[in-house]
Image: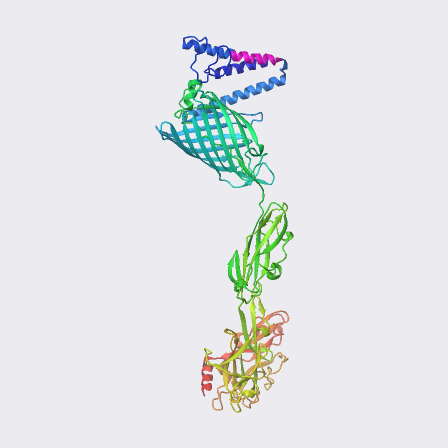
Amino acid sequence: MKKIILYCLIASSLSMLFAGVSYSSNDISLPNLGSDDSVAGSNNSPASSSNKENNSTEEKTSEILLNEAQSNFQNLTAEGMKSEALQYGKNLATASAQSEIESLLSPYGHIATNLNINDQGSLEGSSLDYLVPWYEGESDLWFSQFSAHNKDGRTIANMGIGVRHNITEEWMLGSNIFYDHDMTRGHHRAGLGGEAWTNFLKLSGNYYMPLSSWKDSVDFDDYQERPARGWDIRLQAYLPAYPQLGSSVVYEQYYGDQVALFGKDSLQKDPSAVTVGIDYTPVPLITIQAGYKKGDSDQNEMTANLSLDYRIGVPLSKQLDGDEVANMRSLAGSRMDFVDRNNDIVLEYREKNDLDVGLYLKPTGTAAACILADDPDSAEAYEGCHWTVNATVTSHLKIKSAKWVPMSNFNPESTLGLPALTAGNISNGQNNHWTLTFPAWVNSTDPNANKYKLAVILVDDKGHTKQSNAVNVIVAEAPIDYQLVIDDSGEQKKAIKLLANGNNFANLVASGAKVTGLAGETTPLDAKDLKLTFRAYKIEDKSHSHEIAIHASKNDCKPGSECLFYKEPPSGAKAILGSTTNGVFSIIASKSDDNTQKTNAVLVDFSAASTMIYTAIVDSENPTVNLTATKGNLLQLGHKYQFKIAYDSNNNGQWDATDRETISETDHTPLISLVDYKWMFDGVSPDGTRGGYAVDSLKNNTILIPKTNAEASQVLASAGADGVQGYQLKVDYQLTPAGQKIMNQLRGK
């Protein structure tokens, strides 16, 4: 009984919905296809005819539903009644909502709705299309179109603008642009369209272009998806004699390796499809569509659709009148039709391969002297310098293998000092750093001899392979820091004074080192590789423009002549220099083939015996002994020590207590008054305290060695717990301005 009541209610609703649709008086039939024949048995009165038709519709509809209800009454159950009631309530709700939407929007444009609610409350299959004119003239129409639909769990919105222009009374051309947004998955697409319409015929074309990039796919694990690029051509045609019946042909072409033109379960490469369809429009408000879609590789599908199409400004009675369908097919009547396009966003898929690796160079901690050019893709530095190679790796999979890829014939491990690259020492992220050492510079005319290009290649667990960008390592010849010193009994000096008697010698020692390392370390060069030549100049020759000859041996000097000579042939970077001529000489060592690469200068003062000046440190309690003449002398606690300067009066080549300490026999100015001197505690004490200069009060004075460690600060401010023990006592002295003037005068004489 409940099911009968429900069918009666449905019959009543349907009778009201189809109140304006004509039927045959003898039987329920399809609406008139456009014929002007009158319905048999009709009255002359329009009112009577209308009432009769309405009554006939209600009666026939009720009869059919009642018969259906009676035939199924025997199967009616409590569960079935509940289902029917819920379905009926849902239909009422959706119909009411659809009616409200159309009522709300229809005053402002052309609207078509299809509202569905499934048993789970989803709007799957629902759609809304809304065309709003901006400007409507005799030949031009400017409009916006908004669409939204839910399909396959995706809600897609379409927003577009367009213009239509009647070029003649028979033809209209249009263009449009659309923005499509998949609100469920965040995809974006643009569409460009063109239209050419005439009476009973529509031709449209569309191009679809993805705007969003690849995203992780919802449909497949380890896959990505994005809108597919494609286009279509659409043709709609209607028979003028039967405008309710139409046909359509659509050709679609999309591009991509895995495109879901027929759904996610049928992915194809660059698929295309032809869709042939028919549509039946009994009244302008209702359209029934069916189509057959045929694609590549035997892909096909059938489609069917029922839609309600409400037109602004058109009375509802006309939209329910089958005779008005012909006007819809005319150019004027179709002016407000929706743009014919694919509002669905067809997706393209690809296997997720986010494996990526980028290399860059960075001089992390590298000495500033090493850096010649610092660029992430290219580094130039001196041979022996260090740099870091860094890798940024992106992958959601585990790295299976990794290796260096040299772009020329070299081994990255042996040439650049890089570690062997394996999957174990490279990981996802930015924490990948390796130190390389710039190899030895090669003296070659080949422009690529000192250039090394390097990349890295990775393979993940699924076999995806990715090679990084290449970085360039450019090696420059490191400058050599040349040094020259005088070895005086193990002490390295930059100046020395010797007798010009041919029997006193200056031991010259040259060295060279290249700047290398992260912290500016130097790499000494082998003496035999220096290939230096020693050169001598007068002290007055500041520009070193007049070289003084150095003879190979004393035997090469003419008897009685004055000359510089080697005691023995120079060996590697060492030379022993003597002289039989007085003078102060500036000595350098330079490359045999490049005079610009040279050492610093050292001064050798070869003087006559009477002009030799010696210094000494003596104990005031034993003033005749020069403590600097021998090694191993220990300072005595509580003793005073003096600094002495004297001429070598007795010509014995050393200081002794009988040497003259004045300027001359007639000028009794003490030589020591011509200098400023400071005592210095040199070295490191047993407890690790580094020494330094004595306190300022001892400048140019005698020094008293304290008796206890506690008193050490009286002479050395930085003294530690062990006082002055372990230090060497030295004197740092230089001529005063007045002393320099006097000495210059003496040299002039």
Confirm whether the magenta stretch covers residue 658. no
Q: Is residue 367 above or below residue 157?
A: below
Residue 85 % position (x, y): 57, 18
In this rendered view, identify the residue nearer to me: 363 or 488.
363
In this rendered view, identify the residue nearer to me: 338 or 747.
338
Confirm whether the magenta stretch covers residue 66. yes
Q: Is residue 363 above or below residue 254?
A: below
Q: Name the magenta segment's main secondary structure.
A: helix
Choose top left, top right, bottom left or bottom right for residue 361. Answer: bottom right
Count of marks overlaid on the render: 0
Asked whether the viewer can see residue 365, the reply is yes
First to last magenta residue range: 60-73
Residue 521 % position (x, y): 57, 66
Choose top left, top right, bottom left or bottom right for residue 351. Answer: top right
Position of the N terminus, as image quadrant, is top right
Residue 355 % position (x, y): 58, 47
Query: How is the model colour-coded?
Result: rainbow
Position of the C terminus, as image quadrant, is bottom left
Residue 254 % position (x, y): 52, 37
